[in-house]
Each structure stands twice: as C-alpha cells, then as structure tokens.
Amino acid sequence: MTDNENLNILKKMGLTDYESKAYLALMSLITSKADTISKESGVPRSKIYPVLESLKQKNLIKIRQGRPLEYDVIDPLESLTNYKEDFLRQMDILEKNLVEIYDNKLPTVNTPIQSIEDINKILQKQKDILNKSKKIVLIRLGFLLPSEVDSFKKMILKLDKNGIKVKILSVSKCEVDGVNIDMEEILSNLPVNVRYVQLPSAQLIIRDYKEMMLVFAENSGKSIRNANMVGLYNTYSTIISNYSSAFNRKWNSTDK
C-alpha cells in the first residue's frame, strides 16, 4: 500500500490532512522531535505542535516531557485497534439514532417506489428490511430460492428470538430453476405461524406496516426462474395498507 493510500484512509478515519501526514512521518521515525517530524511530513513548523497535540488526544502518539519535547508513535496494533473499536461504538450509536429518526418519519413521507433488478441487491434489501423489524413481519412466499433456504431460516429464528411476531403465508411446494422445494418441510421446525395457501410466483415482506418489498419471479408455468427477478420497494402507506389487508384476509380465510 502506498503512502497516498494510507493518507486517504487516515483522512477517512477523521484525521486532518496535516494530522495524517504527521502521523505517517512519525510512524516511520518511531520517535522524534517536532522539527524533524515537520520536515519529514511537510507540515509547517507553525502548525506541527497543535497537530501533534491533536494526535496525542486521539491516542495515536505519546508525548515525553523534556526540552525539546519528544514524540513517540504508539504501536498501531494497539492504537488503531482501540481507535477502530471506539469508532465502531460511535457508529452503532449513530446508526441506532438515525434509524429511529428514519422510522419515525417514514410513515409520513411517500418515498418513490424503487425498482431493483439485481438479485444480490434484492436479497440484501430483504435482509435489511427484516433486520429493522421491531414488532411484526408479514411474509408471503410464492417461492424460495434454494440458495437462500438456510439464510431465511436463520433470519426467522433471529426475529423470533427478538420477540418479533412473524406471520408467513406460503405455498406448500414450488420448483425453482428445476429444483423441487418442499416449503412445508423447510418451514416445519420454525417457531412462527405458517399457513399454506395457493400463491403467485412472488414474495412479499411487510415490516411494522412501514416498509414493504414485493419480488416477482419469471414463471414458465412449471418452474420459477431467478434470472429475471424484480423487486419493488416502497413506503407508501396506502399501498402497504392495501397489501397488509389482503394478507390478513387471506390469513383469516384459512381454517387453521
């Protein structure tokens, strides 16, 4: 990795340009005086002292008292690990706060319906929606990709463990890319409510009546193909309400 790459990463971590240059210079020197660090880094001498003080406050270097002061770089295995852990803790707090703001505002704003055609992005969006669930999830399964069976079961178990109510409407069997999928066998050991009904070749996820994702798959009449899947994500309250009502009508129409 080049110095420019290291410099860019340090700046992405939140260090200023001068701090990044001084830190990299001292990393090569290990221990040095401010004048030498200034020359090696290109940081003006008039700026080097506050820059080094800032690096000390970030726990990346140490300052030894004397005339003149001596500056020691802290082993990066120690300092950057601590820095990373603290940064991740702050990111967790930020994520929690921003998700709460987003969730509170989501029902009041009609965001554009988003069309997603890349299968990996569709799967990731579904997982993101489920991970944000707080109270209830409605799932309609007209098919399930063979590659996603284990991942889906783990997610449902996680939701149940977190006390989230899960209701699943599913076909009994389906065929995806020529592979027969026994949905009753797959879902039989999950500790959630499942009811088996006739459904089109589509998937529906509604979480907390705030977000929904509808995924359509190509159906040749016998086997479903994942090559041309399309996902539609939206937060329109009217659309979500209509799909939720249809889901619950179907749910209540079963004899179970």
Image (tube, rainbow, N blue to C red):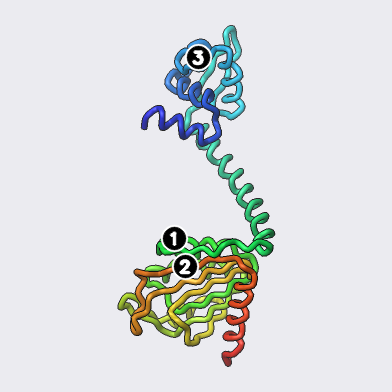
Q: Mark 2: which amino acid?
A: Gly
Which corner quadrant holds the N terminus? top left
Q: Secondary structure at mark 2?
A: strand
| For the residues bearing labels 1 and 2, Cβ distance under 8 angstroms | yes
- Which amino acid does the dot numbered 3 rest on? Ser
Separation of residues labelled 3 and 1 (CA atoms): 47 Å
Q: Nearer the viewer, mark 3 or mark 1?
A: 1
Relative image position of residue 256 (x, y in whole percent): 58, 90
The residue at the point 40 percent across, 27 percent down is: 3
Q: Secondary structure at mark 1?
A: helix
Question: Considering only vertical position in the picture, is 222 above or below 27?
Answer: below
Front in this rendered view, residue 195 or 223: 223
State the residue position of label 1: 121
The earlier-in-sequence mark between 3 and 2 is 3
Q: Is residue 34 visible?
A: yes
Side of 239 relative to 226 (left or right)? right
Q: CA distance from mark 3 to mark 2?
A: 55 Å
Q: What amino acid is labelled 1 in the image? A: Lys
Q: Residue at x 54, y 71 (%)?
A: 205
Instruction: State which tag comes first along the sequence, 1 or 2.
Output: 1
Q: Quadrant of residue 182?
A: bottom left
Q: How many C-alpha atoms fall within 10 Å of the one at disc 1: few (<14), some, or many (≥20)?
A: few
Q: Residues within 10 Å of mark 3 (few under 14, many from 20)?
A: many
State whether residue 130 appears in this view: no
Q: Which residue is mark 2?
A: 231
In the foreground, 90 or 236: 236
State the separation of the CA atoms marked 1 and 2.
9 Å
| Residue in view at x 47 percent, y 69 percent | 152
The residue most toward the top is 67
* Residue holding disc 3: 38
